[in-house]
Amino acid sequence: MKKSDLTYVLTAVFTSAVGFFYCGNRWWNINIPRYYPLEHTWKMVKEKGVPSQSWYGMQIFAFAAAAALTLLVYFALKFLYSKNPDKSLSPTAHKIIGLAAVGVIVFCMGYILKFEFSKWGIFTEIKNGCSCQP
């Protein structure tokens, strides 16, 4: 596989995998490290009534898992195209890979937005009319 095609495929895999694994934290209830800013410490448990931030742990998991998957795809493509390293992807393959990556990213962004809006009651506020005071 040509170097430019390999770069294109790996970029598509990595970017879509980051979004997928970020959402995967919510879907699979993965125990991730949480930062407790008042205590200036990290813990693997969620303590009730104590403010904590899970975003950092979610990012670490998403980027590490996406990097591992991208590395696996890299080695698989290197093995599959070892006999014909100058073979290039067809224009149709480029379109399919690009559309699939964009589809995964848009779906994951929509899910994250829905999750956060539901968590903070924004949908309820929109439905009932904003009671915000200026």
Image (cartoon, rainbow, N blue to C red):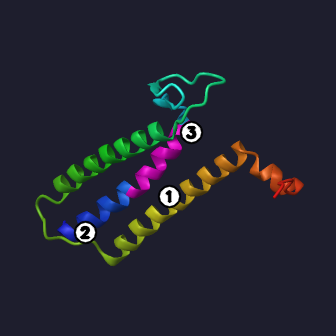
> Magenta part mainly helix, strand or loop?
helix
Q: Is residue 59 magenta?
A: no
> Mark 1 belongs to which amino acid?
Val
> Mark 3 belongs to which amino acid?
Arg
Which of the pair 109/97 is nearer the observer?
A: 109
Q: Quadrant of the C terminus?
A: bottom right
Q: On the picture, is 118 further left or further right than 90? A: right
Q: Quadrant of the N terminus?
A: bottom left
Q: On the picture, is 61 further left or further right than 132? A: left
Spatial separation of the CA atoms under disc 2 and disc 1: 20 Å
Q: Where residue 84 appears, x then y in whole percent?
A: 12, 65
Q: Residue at x 61, y 57 (%)?
A: 110
* Residue at the extreme bottom: 91
Secondary element type, mark 3: helix
Q: Are marks 2 and 3 in contact (CB under 8 Å)?
A: no
Within-10-Å neighbours for mark 2: few <14, some 14–19, many 20+: some
Q: Circle 3 is placed at which residue position? A: 26
Q: Earlier in the sequence, mark 1 or mark 3?
A: 3
Magenta stretch? 15-27
Q: Circle 1 is placed at which residue position? A: 104
Q: Where residue 102 appears, x then y in whole percent?
A: 48, 65
The quarter holding residue 51 reads top right
Count of labels in the image: 3
What label sits on residue 5 in the rendered view? Answer: 2
Q: Nearer the viewer, mark 2 or mark 3?
A: 3
